[in-house]
Image (spheres, rainbow, N blue to C red):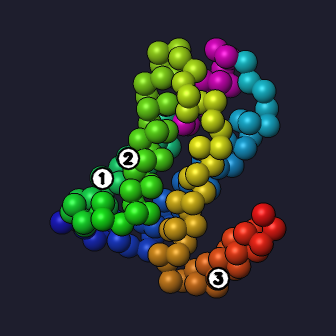
Amino acid sequence: EIIRHFSEAPWFNLGVAGVIVANLVLMGVETDNEVEEGSATRIFFYVLEVTFNAVYVFEIIARVHCKGWTYFCDAANLGDVVIVLLSGADAFVLTPMGTEGPFSSMASLRVLRLFRLVRLFKLMTMFRELWLLMLGLIRSLRTLS
């Protein structure tokens, strides 16, 4: 019953948004710095990646527990699940096997987490102005392409 309450609370959404932002920043730092395989820095980034994925899995479990199977009726939620599953497959299966999987080489796939952040901001009414600003930015990007 407690999970039902906190998974819909604004502080939970804000916390998840903070985790996503931290993950995106660290992905940028990792991408910007060429890190050797097996180095302490590579291990550090891997531990962080596993931690972020564990948080994302917990978030989805909490939301499914709260909303039941109707959680999967929303296309955005399905997108979240796919992103988390692919990231989890990369972090928990392919990387420990020493396989540079198809998901590792597609760094742009990891950036899809940014869409999760945008969606979380949309859900939070206290960020209405920020959502409108981001919506305007997204629409202007369509014009440029």
In which quarter of the view is residue 133 placed? bottom right
Residue 17, image x, y percentages: 54, 62
What residue is shown with label 2? 57
Question: Which label lies toward us, 2 or 3?
Answer: 3
Magenta-drawn stretch contains 140:
no
| Residue corresponding to mark 3 | 132
**Which residues, given as a range, are shown in magenta?**
37-49
Up-down relation of residue 109 to residue 2 (above or below): above
Q: Residue furthest left?
A: 1
Q: Could you tell me which quadrant the N terminus lies in?
A: bottom left
Mark earlier in primary sequence (3, 1): 1
Q: Is residue 67 left or right of residue 11?
A: left
User: Which residue in the protein does label 1 denote?
Assistant: 61
Q: Which mark is residue 42?
A: none
Residue 53 seen: yes
Please say if the residues under marks 2 and 1 sit with CB atoms less than 8 Å apart.
Answer: yes
Q: CA distance from mark 2 to mark 3?
A: 29 Å
Residue for point 81% across, 68% down: 144
Amino acid type, mark 3:
Leu
Point out residue 54 in the picture as x, y percentages from the top left corner.
Answer: 41, 42
Q: Mark 1 falls on what kind of element? A: helix
Q: Is residue 47 magenta?
A: yes
Magenta stretch, main secondary structure class: helix
Badge 3 marks a residue whose secondary structure is helix
The amino acid beneath tag 1 is Ile
